[in-house]
Image (cartoon, rainbow, N blue to C red):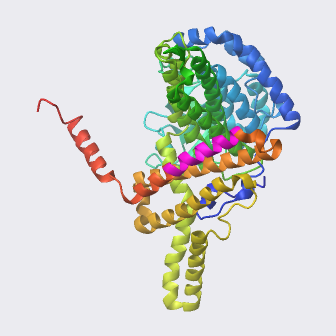
Amino acid sequence: MAVDPNRSFMRSLCLGVIDEDMLLPFPRIGGETAETLRAVIDSIDDLLGPRAEDFRAWDAAGELPREFVDELRAFGLFGLVVPEEHGGLGFGSLAYSRTLQQIARHDASVAVTVGAHNSIGMRGLLLFGTEEQRRRYYPKLASGEMIAAFCLTEPEAGSDAASVKTTAVDEGDHFRLNGSKLWITNVEIADFFTVFAKTGPKDSRGKLSAFIVTRDMPGVSVAPHEDKMGLRASYTNAVFFDDVKVPKENLLGPLHGGFKVAMKILNSGRSGLGGGAVGAMKRLIELASHQARERRQFGRPIGEFGLVKQKIGQMVVDCYAAEAVVTLVAGWVDAGSEDYAVEAAIGKVFASEALWRTADEALQVAGGNGYMRDYPYERFLRDSRINRIFEGTNEILRLFIALNAMNDVGAQLQELAASLQDVFVHPIKGFGVLSEYARKHVSLATGAGRSRFTQLHPRLDRAASQFEGHVRVLAQVVDRLLRKHGRNIVEKQLATRRLADIMIDLFVLAAVLARVDAQIRSRGEAASHRDLQILDVFAGGARRRIAQNLADVDDNEDEPLKDLADYAMDRGGYGWDVFG
């Protein structure tokens, strides 16, 4: 795999370019890291495997016992990404994601406690910390003496991070921090907070900065923990900052650069969330498979019925595809990529929604048992729901995926618009730009140039050809929408959502192609029969979804739907009744 730090697979794809070198060879964990990872996974199973009844009791109580948190410390689970020289395991994104996967097989509250520390709580220190900051905090974070929390969300600042109200006023040798943060994971047991506050004028949006705040600073206080639908045993609280004096040396990253710091942390940490989703899916498939074999109806196991087989088969396809995407993006991060925000967002959206479908269908396979708290299905369902909300809601991320990936196409259209003026002033220069733009679109229409695969195993030609056809259509649709709406595309959320869904299907299909290619090359075609079946099923579903989304770009019911929503909001609810 060849990774240029400044290349994005999906942004290139919107220009009709298949950056095949970014897909192949598919990432894998090997060498000493693999040996260490196996030992860690075995230790996790030893620690968590016997605790199934404890997890159910802790979920009901709404809290992890502090003694159990001490066990997590002793096992080194808070030092997964801390460099080895500072007492951690030094795992990269791929090994870390695989570790979170194993924890999530056992319990989501434990996974989010470990993940909030490693994925986002201390990730800013890893990415932006000074050498002095790292020397000071790494050893305590690695041992779990200090647990970390990521403090961004506020009552009026969720997905809209620029609307943060917490302030940090420069007072010479320190900043004075005032404000509050809402729904912060781990803050009740944390001593190290990554806090985002406004450092610009009071009436301005944006100009955030990130700070390291510790619990022992006067003015820091934590509210009682929240009573939640899912992840009930994890710690979630509000935290308050009342005239907290934060030393200047605790500034994390550049002054006024907090928005980019926050986005970089979230992008970098999404492999943990994706890994957790994959681990939960694997466990749910085990549970549903056992239920389908053992439960009998009409004189035979329910697993013999086609509708049950369909559910379990789709769970397998979704899990394989999610694992492929999470692995590919984590591999890029480990290889030094800097431009993976779109692909990381796709991984989060796809994995969180695949887990939700899997949890729902596994509960359905279990029937009435699935609805009972004596069984784990309903807890998996409750725990999985938050994944579509936190670390960026899936609605916001869909808009981000579509708009960010279209940036380069928009830049080309701006260049084209400028060249139209040149046609009259400098005919040769102007027509040269126009002819180059036309040449690119001819290339897309014919499949010439870099809009084709050249390195995939020949057995994958059919799926590869399907992918190539969709890429050419995608590039044309992006071009058409930008020509039609221009800068107003930002307000066309339903159109951009369709584009995002097409992009999600295409990226996931690309990841599955790369994974199956690696399987065939390492094990042979015959031994990869099941992988090929998964590819066929996913590609078929993607083909139908993409065709529908493309058709809906120009022929849809968007306007009447929005009108009905306005009507309901104006009335304050539903406006009909069968009684007249």
- Residue 247 drawn at (x, y percent): 66, 35
Q: Is residue 96 above or below residue 48?
A: below
Instruction: State the residue in front, 557 or 497.
Output: 557
- Compared across the picture, whether 346 is left or right of 69 comes to left
- Does the magenta segment cover residue 564? no
* Image spot of residue 318 (x, y percent): 59, 37
Q: Main secondary structure of the magenta part?
A: helix
Q: Residue at x 85, y 38 (%)?
A: 30
Can I make out residue 241 in this image?
no
Q: How many marks?
A: 0
Residue 544 visible? The answer is yes
Q: Would you place residue 5 above or below residue 369 in this image?
A: below
Q: Position of residue 537 (x, y in %)?
A: 59, 43
Q: Quadrant of the C terminus?
A: top left
- Most extreme residue toward the left is 580
Please name whichever residue, 122 or 446, is drawn nearer the observer in this view of the structure: 446
Asked if residue 533 lies in the magenta stretch, the reply is yes
Residue 562 locus on image (x, y percent): 30, 48
**Which of 547 and 15 lies nearest the eye of the viewer?**
547
The residue shown at (18%, 35%) is: 576
Left or right? Give the position of 574 relative to 163.
left
At x 50% / y 41%, what residue is drawn?
394
Which residue is at 78% across, 19% downward? 43
User: Quadrant location of residue 173?
Assistant: top right
Please say if 142 is above or below 403. above
| 273 or 470: nearer the viewer | 470
Quarter where residue 209 is shown: top right
Q: Is the residue 77 above or below the residue 327 in the image?
A: above
Question: Which residues are drawn in magenta?
Answer: 530-544
> Which residue, as the protein is rendered here, is positioned at the far right?
32
